[in-house]
Amino acid sequence: MSEYNHPYKDVDFVIKEIVEFDSFCQNAGLADINSEFASVILTEAAKLGSDVIAPLNTSGDNQGASLKDNKVQQADGFKEAYQQYMENGWSSLTAEEEYGGQNLPNLFGTAINEIWQSSNLAFSLCPMLTQGAISAIKHHGSEELKNTWLPNMISGLWTGTMNLTEPDAGTDLAAIKTKAIPNADHYLISGQKIFITWGDHQMTENMVHLVLARLPDAPSGVKGISLFVVPKFLLDKEGNTTSQLNDAHCTALEHKLGIHASPTCSMSFGDNQGAVGYIVGEPHKGLSYMFTMMNHARQDVGLQGLGVSERSYQQALEFAKERIQGTHKDGSRFSIIKFPDVRRMLMQMKSSIEAMRALAYVASNETDKSRYAKNAQDKTKHFSRVELYTPIVKGWLTELAQEITYLGTQIHGGMGFIEETGSAQHYRDARILTIYEGTTGIQALDLVGRKTLFDKGEQLAELLNDIEMTAKELQQKPQFNNLAVSLENAITTGREARQWLLDNAQTDKSAAGSVSVNFMMMFGYICGAWLMAKAALKAQALLDSGEGERAFLQSKLVTTQFYFDHLLPRIKTNIAIIQSGSDSIMSLAEDQF
Amino acid sequence: MSEYNHPYKDVDFVIKEIVEFDSFCQNAGLADINSEFASVILTEAAKLGSDVIAPLNTSGDNQGASLKDNKVQQADGFKEAYQQYMENGWSSLTAEEEYGGQNLPNLFGTAINEIWQSSNLAFSLCPMLTQGAISAIKHHGSEELKNTWLPNMISGLWTGTMNLTEPDAGTDLAAIKTKAIPNADHYLISGQKIFITWGDHQMTENMVHLVLARLPDAPSGVKGISLFVVPKFLLDKEGNTTSQLNDAHCTALEHKLGIHASPTCSMSFGDNQGAVGYIVGEPHKGLSYMFTMMNHARQDVGLQGLGVSERSYQQALEFAKERIQGTHKDGSRFSIIKFPDVRRMLMQMKSSIEAMRALAYVASNETDKSRYAKNAQDKTKHFSRVELYTPIVKGWLTELAQEITYLGTQIHGGMGFIEETGSAQHYRDARILTIYEGTTGIQALDLVGRKTLFDKGEQLAELLNDIEMTAKELQQKPQFNNLAVSLENAITTGREARQWLLDNAQTDKSAAGSVSVNFMMMFGYICGAWLMAKAALKAQALLDSGEGERAFLQSKLVTTQFYFDHLLPRIKTNIAIIQSGSDSIMSLAEDQF
């Protein structure tokens, strides 16, 4: 077991220096908001995270959630922690004022979510799914629907779930079979859903399930899916929760590798008369409504990769400083952090995490920039950047989280394999992140397909041009000459990959899918290098002007150098693989495997 | 849960075509032994593996081992499986005839161990540790010791354990505190050991613990450690097991991430009068005796990486062929193996496994070549090659096993995270492999230190020269021109890395430790490329002459190409990292982490 401490120095630096949040707030006309205010808010969130939510991480893993009489019992302490989370107003931080929200920028949500996720990945999923459900209703629901459901979800009084997957419909949502039959002012829903995160619990008076289902006249495939709100308990005419259970309940809990305290439910809708549901928006548009939420949900899962990595790093660092295993020539002993290979692993974790955080926060702020844009062109520009970043944030951050939590256990040696140490939990918990909300393969396909081939690589070209501006800045500083050359080379490599994709995707229909994951990872490493280079420029400028904390700023120069030495060279492998195309992937007959 | 099928086609191919086992047997004068005989033996072992041992893998994981009254109860079915293993004579396969062994070459042991390890990693550890104990006694024990202990260990009637680690002495064996006091014809041992694999069980009538301890007059540090045989039950004068328990017992079992059915014991020696022990060899030489065993034990753990990877691959492949998730334009559905990214993952697993197997078997056969060498020079040459391969086999194979078992769960999508699917078990089980018998960092240090710097890179230069001979063979075949160029480049890269190490290790004392893991991984990839290239040459020759199974031989050409496209390019990253040296690893002060 380990404590969690909010890495406030790096978080503050990213918000202030890399996102450049203060100038964003000024441009957006957000008079009362700035990076200092963010820091104050985060300090408060960090207290709840460290003192209340993080201590439940180990106990929640050991106890897990349990099912009795169709009711899910959450792990001990979770209800009380959730209560504090709700009462302190964290649930409403970024929601609209109209429904009781505090209307703070999206970046605040990202920065506090990192805290919940580092503290307790299983716990953090409950608010995260609720945010997704709120977003679906907010963007696509009727006024009546919004007024009925949003205030209590935003206040945290009710939580939300997302019901997509069915036994035969995982990634392939076209295969969804759940039915919705019109019945007076509502619909009667019936069907089976699986893998429903926090599908039931006893922490709140009610829950709101968002359910994908088919109307009787629905076309087949993905164009025949509609979205419904299905409450756990029915409401009375005033919109208050009654004691009448809807015809929807949890039938089983999955026995999972990790996130044990997050109940993963099999849900049964309409075992009797049918579950009462209310349609969100128009019929047959459910899938496109789901896609609206996806940018947010996928970036949130990417952020979970950051969160669990930070936690794993903190624990490994503490161990490496305390574990005595070496002996000096004079007989005195020393801790393993002095060994170069242990330092290499710690640096790998640390510099990856810093790059991941920078990208997650920059991507999050693009949502704010789109929202507060002064004109339609800027709005579109920033929204397109959100769309481009999303699969990279989800795919790259969660893949790196596997490596980082692996190194976290590796640094512990034999102790890492012992469950009581706690490091293995991070490794187990992290494993889901490259799977849910679309696997790494799905993210990568999204990047090469909808985000690159669809616009002939225009967005990607713009991103690379933005990165080139930083490379030019580096060139002007003699001490950053090496970084400048490496970043320029990386940009060239990125452009080669983009061109290869554009050149080959038409003539070889397997090309895009064959290179996609390497393509996505490559752009992750390039984005990371870009933002670390920005960080180094800013850190050096502050050092030159005598501002800020020297030791921290100097460490930024080192982690940037390490990133360029150890992480960025991976794109040499990525580009070689990409340029080898699909031949050796597609040649075998199935029975030759 | 999944079945295990012995991958006999590839195994036979590796033994016959890559190891070239038949010409080895001829040269060694082993008249009755050849690759056909090996194939027959392996078919028998595969039956026991598939029918008896593999089905216990899931149940053993679920049930685990348990401790009651200082006795460890193994999982259900293990005793009966062990009984069959023993009665069928598998325990004595490679042991010396003098003590009841069958005296078959080491390669037989490797090939059957792969079967046990794929079938059930937890089970396989019991025989594996016994082999290690046998080896220690055989190489260093007195005649009396050998006659007393070896026959029953070789027959499998008694199992063996290795007791090295103590709470404060993991990698750092200098810190060992366990004591051995002379007492008539034996010693009285007292102390605590942890992480003792299969430290107790009820499968056999007796057990033989090998224990590192210090004599009263021992110098401090690693030069004061002696090795002792400590039986579970004392023997009578005829050497038969009595009912009298020694003063040694298991006090606790570890709660681990994986290999649940392998009891990991805390052992207490000498709680009362002291545990009766017999010294192996001379006083104070225990550490060097341990090192004798290490080549074998470490190669065995590398082989475990191969074993669990093969099992994970078989399960993922079956899933990918059965899981329907795509829809053709005509509405017909298809399984996920048709998706390029799923194929990419399967090819990554398959081609890695083939390269891993080739290296493990070639390394194993070097032990045989050393043993049967006609002169001292050849003996030394092959033994040096064993020494060089060992850290690569251990380090590279077990690191790849992490990636492969990760991909195995990834291919399963959401089902991969559900424990009942069984894929997650392989991922959990594999996690120990880069830790025990020396972490990856320790293997890498061994390679850069004792195996490279110590002889000024001579062994490594010879290996690269051997690889170059294969590159020249490739050059002579027009269809292999691309492979030839890639392999030549890889050799050049390997030479650059070697030279960098030789040039920098003296002037920068952190250099070797900073680059070691990348150095070790790079040589793994290069060795893999070499042996896959050999495989392609052999496969093509057989195809040209119309021999062998066409579909299999053609698949070898494809997996080789895939290896060169996807695995070998990783050395571009490795060399860049190596040449960046230690600066960015060593620069931070400890409180800057």
Image (cartoon, coloured by chain):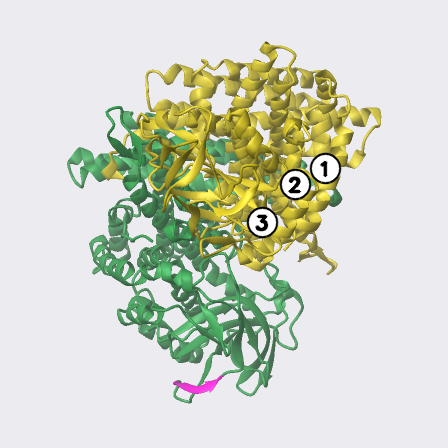
Chain colours: A green, B yellow
Give SS at disc 3: loop
Q: Position of residue A87 (x, y in %)?
A: 27, 72
Q: Nearer the viewer, residue A174 or B510?
A: B510
Which residue lies under the disc numbered 2? B115
* Residue ID at (60%, 37%): B152
Judge whether B21 appears above or below B110 on screen.
above
Q: Nearer the viewer, residue A380 or B216?
A: B216
Which residue lies under the disc numbered 3? B203
The numbered mark, 3 or 2, whose residue comes first in the sequence reads: 2
Judge whether A281 appears above or below B438 on screen.
below
Q: Point out which mark residue B42 bears.
A: 1
* Residue ID at (55%, 54%): B61
Judge if badges 3 and 1 mark residues of a common chain: yes
In this view, the mark in front (3 or 2): 3
In this view, the mark in front (3 or 1): 3
* Magenta region includes residue A530: no
Judge whether B15 appears above or below A416 on screen.
above
* Magenta region includes residue A243: yes
Specify the segment rendered in magenta.
A240-245
Q: Point out which mark residue A61 bears.
A: none
Q: CA distance from mark 3 to mark 2?
A: 20 Å
- Please tell me how crowded label 2 is: few (under 14), some (14-19), or many (20+) other residues with Cα within 10 Å: many
- Circle 2 marks a residue in which chain? B
- Residue A505 picture quarter: top right
Q: CA distance from mark 3 to mark 1?
A: 24 Å
- Circle 1 marks a residue in which chain? B
Left or right relative to B458: residue A543: left
- Dot 1 amino acid type: Leu
- Please tell me how crowded label 1 is: few (under 14), some (14-19), or many (20+) other residues with Cα within 10 Å: many
